[in-house]
Amino acid sequence: MKSLSNDVSQLGAKLFVSLKLWFREHWESVTSIAIGVAATVYYTAHPEKATSQIQSIAHLCQWLVKTFFIYLSLPLIGLITVLAIICYKLKRKLDQFSEYICYTKQGKSRWEDLGIVRYGHLAYEPFLKYSPINRMPEGFGLELLRKLLMPPASDLKKNRVERNWGNILDGLVDDVYDIVATPLFHTFERSRKVRFSSPLFFSNIGLYVKSETVKGHNWTKGMTVLEMKTALSGANDLSFIVVNGEISEKLTSKYAKQNKIILSEDSVLRCSVFDDIANSVDPHPKYAFFCESFYARIHPKVMDGTVVNLLGPHQILYPVCFAMRMGDYQLANLLNIRLLEYAHKHADTYGVFGELRKTLRAQDASLKDAEISQHFVSQWPCSENGIES
């Protein structure tokens, strides 16, 4: 009998402990159910109090909603706006930095062991062209590189791909070649990707439009840059032709309205652009085109006066340089030192600029120094000792 009593006591104790543990784990549910049952019984017995309570809860919810929108929504909207502006500015900064090519130091040895220099190329006269016989690059830029780099360079090796304005710098960035044999304009946008040598000389840029466009707007030729900007601000009928990656794209983005830009389908500059300008008639848009004045001068439409240059001489001058990889400081330093040596050695003939004049006269014996100096200069045109004076 005593044993049975002990077993019942132990079973009761175990049951109590189990119920205690279960209640500890589920007390929230049990309490909620109990409160719900009690509330149901109470409000069933007193329905008028249930209606009043529901109305009180509704008023409480309305107050909470009003409080949130009046006192919290405006600061929250302001905070979200500030965060959005910060994120936008950070994205702009990151986009700008992404356009720059990280400076990676090249693993070359000293100049004496320069070896073979690989070069990229782009057909652009008078600096470089392709032989009609075998498509080999030739011209002023390549010959000047040979004079400046050999020795210590053992040879110049051409890249087999004929590049265009849209991808000429990609070969440097991707380490396909070491230098571009076609001298290029040094612009801020290009300097984000590659390194440039010291200027060889400066090239004159003109803005070319149809002569009838000048008359229609009562413009006068020989404008300054400021006069050109004023004239273009009111020329809503003028559209600008640009070649991707070429100087026309750079200057058009700087001086023209963005909705007036027409991207050429060609990846290289072609003489047909001047035909497009000459053939533009109402009601079609009138075309304009930024271009090197030396390149434009030989086109028939420019020669006969159908297409004219709005700008006066030397209003827009851009430095012409050799382009190399960003981190190839050995090649850049060697080239710059050789350019200094060349300028000192040939000071009486204006250094590299004199070499360019010689090349141009060899191509066209009718060219005079004064005419060449309208398109290329080696120093500030207004200087007392300048070649233009």
Image (cartoon, grey):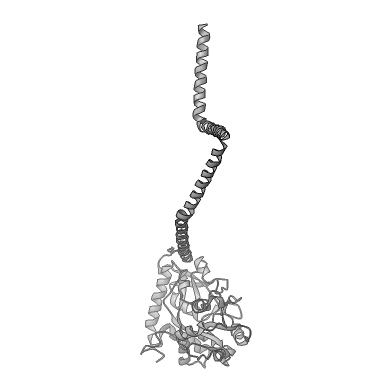
- For this orientation, the residue located farthest to the top is 1
Q: Is residue 288 visible?
A: yes
Out of 291 and 223, give the one closest to the viewer.
Answer: 223
The spot of residue 386 in percent (x, y) is 38, 88
The spot of residue 356 in percent (x, y) is 47, 85
Out of 156 and 293, give the one closest to the viewer.
Answer: 293
The spot of residue 108 in percent (x, y) is 43, 65
Up-down: is 97 above or below 300? above
Q: Quadrant of residue 165?
A: bottom right
Out of 187 and 366, give the one closest to the viewer.
Answer: 187
Up-down: is 139 above or below 78? below
Circle count? 0
| Residue occupying image coordinates x 59% and y 89% | 301
The spot of residue 311 in percent (x, y) is 49, 87
Q: Is residue 204 visible?
A: no
Out of 345 and 352, give the one closest to the viewer.
Answer: 352
